[in-house]
Amino acid sequence: MYMDCHLMVTNPMDYVDEFVKAGASGFTFHVEVAKDNWQELIHKIKAGGMRAGVALRPGTPVEEVFPLVESQEPVDMVLVMTVEPGFGGQSFMPETMPKVNALRRKFPLLDIEVDGGLAPATIKQAAEAGANCIVAGSAVFGAKDPAEVIATLRQGVDAAQTSSIFFK
Protein backbone atom coordinates (compact mmCIF):
# COMPACT_ATOMS: atom_id res chain seq x y z
CA MET A 1 0.00 0.00 0.00
CA TYR A 2 1.23 3.48 -0.86
CA MET A 3 1.39 5.68 2.25
CA ASP A 4 1.56 9.38 1.41
CA CYS A 5 2.42 11.48 4.47
CA HIS A 6 1.58 15.19 4.31
CA LEU A 7 3.24 17.05 7.18
CA MET A 8 2.06 20.47 8.28
CA VAL A 9 5.02 21.16 10.57
CA THR A 10 7.50 24.00 10.93
CA ASN A 11 10.66 21.91 10.51
CA PRO A 12 9.97 18.90 8.27
CA MET A 13 13.66 17.91 8.23
CA ASP A 14 13.26 16.76 11.85
CA TYR A 15 10.70 14.12 10.81
CA VAL A 16 12.18 12.49 7.72
CA ASP A 17 14.09 9.72 9.49
CA GLU A 18 11.06 8.69 11.58
CA PHE A 19 8.85 8.45 8.50
CA VAL A 20 11.49 6.40 6.68
CA LYS A 21 11.54 4.00 9.65
CA ALA A 22 7.73 3.88 9.66
CA GLY A 23 7.72 2.78 6.01
CA ALA A 24 6.20 5.90 4.44
CA SER A 25 6.09 5.91 0.64
CA GLY A 26 5.83 9.67 0.17
CA PHE A 27 6.73 12.69 2.29
CA THR A 28 5.07 16.01 1.48
CA PHE A 29 6.20 19.24 3.15
CA HIS A 30 4.96 22.82 2.82
CA VAL A 31 7.00 25.18 0.65
CA GLU A 32 6.25 28.01 3.08
CA VAL A 33 8.38 26.41 5.85
CA ALA A 34 11.25 25.04 3.76
CA LYS A 35 12.48 28.10 1.89
CA ASP A 36 16.04 27.85 3.22
CA ASN A 37 16.71 24.12 3.05
CA TRP A 38 14.42 22.59 0.43
CA GLN A 39 17.26 21.10 -1.63
CA GLU A 40 18.70 19.30 1.40
CA LEU A 41 15.21 18.22 2.46
CA ILE A 42 14.34 16.75 -0.95
CA HIS A 43 17.67 14.91 -1.01
CA LYS A 44 17.08 13.44 2.46
CA ILE A 45 13.53 12.34 1.57
CA LYS A 46 14.66 10.62 -1.63
CA ALA A 47 17.75 9.09 0.01
CA GLY A 48 15.32 7.49 2.46
CA GLY A 49 13.49 5.83 -0.43
CA MET A 50 10.41 8.06 -0.36
CA ARG A 51 8.83 10.21 -3.05
CA ALA A 52 9.18 13.92 -2.29
CA GLY A 53 6.17 16.20 -2.49
CA VAL A 54 5.70 19.88 -1.81
CA ALA A 55 2.43 21.47 -0.68
CA LEU A 56 1.24 24.95 -1.52
CA ARG A 57 -1.28 26.88 0.61
CA PRO A 58 -4.12 28.72 -1.17
CA GLY A 59 -2.51 32.15 -0.64
CA THR A 60 0.99 31.21 -1.79
CA PRO A 61 1.89 32.07 -5.40
CA VAL A 62 2.30 28.95 -7.55
CA GLU A 63 5.64 30.22 -8.84
CA GLU A 64 7.18 29.47 -5.42
CA VAL A 65 7.24 25.74 -6.21
CA PHE A 66 8.70 26.06 -9.71
CA PRO A 67 12.34 25.89 -8.52
CA LEU A 68 11.56 22.70 -6.57
CA VAL A 69 10.17 21.03 -9.70
CA GLU A 70 12.95 22.33 -11.95
CA SER A 71 15.91 21.51 -9.69
CA GLN A 72 18.50 18.80 -10.35
CA GLU A 73 16.81 16.68 -7.69
CA PRO A 74 13.16 17.71 -8.13
CA VAL A 75 10.06 16.93 -6.12
CA ASP A 76 7.91 14.15 -7.53
CA MET A 77 4.59 15.80 -6.77
CA VAL A 78 3.04 19.18 -6.02
CA LEU A 79 0.05 19.31 -3.69
CA VAL A 80 -2.22 22.32 -4.20
CA MET A 81 -4.24 22.91 -1.05
CA THR A 82 -7.81 23.70 -2.06
CA VAL A 83 -8.73 24.74 1.50
CA GLU A 84 -6.77 26.48 4.24
CA PRO A 85 -4.85 23.68 5.97
CA GLY A 86 -5.71 22.69 9.49
CA PHE A 87 -8.98 20.80 9.68
CA GLY A 88 -11.29 18.68 7.53
CA GLY A 89 -14.75 19.35 6.21
CA GLN A 90 -14.04 22.75 4.64
CA SER A 91 -15.49 23.96 1.36
CA PHE A 92 -13.51 23.58 -1.87
CA MET A 93 -11.86 26.82 -3.02
CA PRO A 94 -12.31 26.99 -6.82
CA GLU A 95 -10.02 30.03 -6.94
CA THR A 96 -7.07 27.64 -6.46
CA MET A 97 -7.70 25.91 -9.81
CA PRO A 98 -5.60 28.38 -11.85
CA LYS A 99 -2.59 27.11 -9.84
CA VAL A 100 -3.36 23.53 -10.86
CA ASN A 101 -3.79 24.67 -14.45
CA ALA A 102 -0.50 26.61 -14.44
CA LEU A 103 1.37 23.62 -13.02
CA ARG A 104 -0.12 21.24 -15.58
CA ARG A 105 0.75 23.56 -18.48
CA LYS A 106 4.33 24.08 -17.30
CA PHE A 107 4.97 20.51 -16.09
CA PRO A 108 2.83 18.11 -18.16
CA LEU A 109 4.24 14.93 -16.57
CA LEU A 110 4.20 16.10 -12.95
CA ASP A 111 1.90 14.48 -10.39
CA ILE A 112 -0.42 17.24 -9.21
CA GLU A 113 -2.49 16.51 -6.13
CA VAL A 114 -5.39 18.52 -4.72
CA ASP A 115 -6.55 18.35 -1.11
CA GLY A 116 -9.54 20.00 0.49
CA GLY A 117 -13.25 19.93 -0.17
CA LEU A 118 -12.97 17.30 -2.90
CA ALA A 119 -16.26 15.49 -3.41
CA PRO A 120 -18.39 14.25 -6.30
CA ALA A 121 -19.58 17.84 -6.89
CA THR A 122 -16.05 19.30 -7.16
CA ILE A 123 -14.00 16.49 -8.65
CA LYS A 124 -14.63 17.39 -12.30
CA GLN A 125 -13.35 20.93 -11.85
CA ALA A 126 -10.13 19.74 -10.19
CA ALA A 127 -9.46 17.02 -12.76
CA GLU A 128 -10.20 19.29 -15.73
CA ALA A 129 -7.74 21.84 -14.32
CA GLY A 130 -5.06 19.16 -14.46
CA ALA A 131 -5.03 17.37 -11.09
CA ASN A 132 -4.28 13.66 -11.35
CA CYS A 133 -4.08 12.84 -7.61
CA ILE A 134 -7.03 13.49 -5.31
CA VAL A 135 -7.35 13.59 -1.51
CA ALA A 136 -10.94 13.20 -0.36
CA GLY A 137 -11.20 12.76 3.40
CA SER A 138 -14.58 14.00 4.63
CA ALA A 139 -16.40 13.08 1.42
CA VAL A 140 -15.31 9.46 1.80
CA PHE A 141 -15.21 8.93 5.55
CA GLY A 142 -18.42 10.87 6.18
CA ALA A 143 -20.39 8.92 3.57
CA LYS A 144 -22.88 6.15 4.26
CA ASP A 145 -21.24 4.16 1.48
CA PRO A 146 -17.55 5.13 1.18
CA ALA A 147 -16.94 2.62 -1.64
CA GLU A 148 -19.66 4.26 -3.73
CA VAL A 149 -18.15 7.72 -3.19
CA ILE A 150 -14.69 6.46 -4.14
CA ALA A 151 -16.10 4.90 -7.32
CA THR A 152 -17.91 8.15 -8.16
CA LEU A 153 -14.72 10.17 -7.60
CA ARG A 154 -12.70 7.82 -9.81
CA GLN A 155 -15.32 8.00 -12.56
CA GLY A 156 -15.31 11.79 -12.30
CA VAL A 157 -11.53 11.97 -12.64
CA ASP A 158 -11.50 9.49 -15.52
CA ALA A 159 -14.24 11.36 -17.39
CA ALA A 160 -12.63 14.76 -16.87
CA GLN A 161 -9.21 13.50 -17.93
CA THR A 162 -10.65 11.85 -21.02
CA SER A 163 -12.06 15.20 -22.14
CA SER A 164 -9.17 17.37 -20.92
CA ILE A 165 -6.54 18.70 -23.30
CA PHE A 166 -3.93 17.94 -20.65
CA PHE A 167 -4.32 14.18 -20.72
CA LYS A 168 -4.46 13.52 -24.48
Image (cartoon, grey):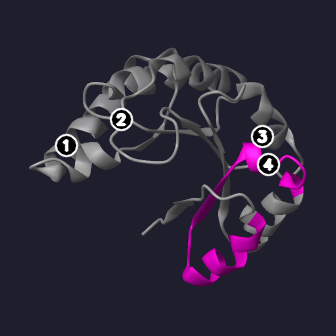
Query: Type of residue at label 1?
Result: Val
- The crowding category of the residue bearing disc 4, from other C-alpha atoms within 10 Å (few below 14, some 14 to 19, many at least 20), is some
Residue at 56 percent across and 78 percent down: it is 23
Query: Type of residue at label 2?
Result: Leu
Residue at mark 2:
118
Residue at mark 4:
74
Residue 90: x %, y % from top left: 37, 36
Disc 1, SS: helix
18 vs 78: above or below: below
- The crowding category of the residue bearing disc 3, from other C-alpha atoms within 10 Å (few below 14, some 14 to 19, many at least 20), is some
Residue 109: x %, y % from top left: 64, 35
Report the quarter where the N terminus lies.
bottom left
Residue at mark 3:
69
Q: Earlier in the sequence, mark 4 or mark 3?
A: 3
Residue at 59 percent across and 62 percent down: it is 26
Residue at mark 1:
149
Residue at 62 percent across and 75 percent down: it is 19
**For the magenta stretch, what is the residue range?**
13-39
Check if mark 2's residue and mark 3's residue have beta carbons within 8 Å: no
Q: How many marks?
A: 4
- Quote the CA–CA distance across marks 4 and 1: 33 Å
Query: Type of residue at label 3?
Result: Val
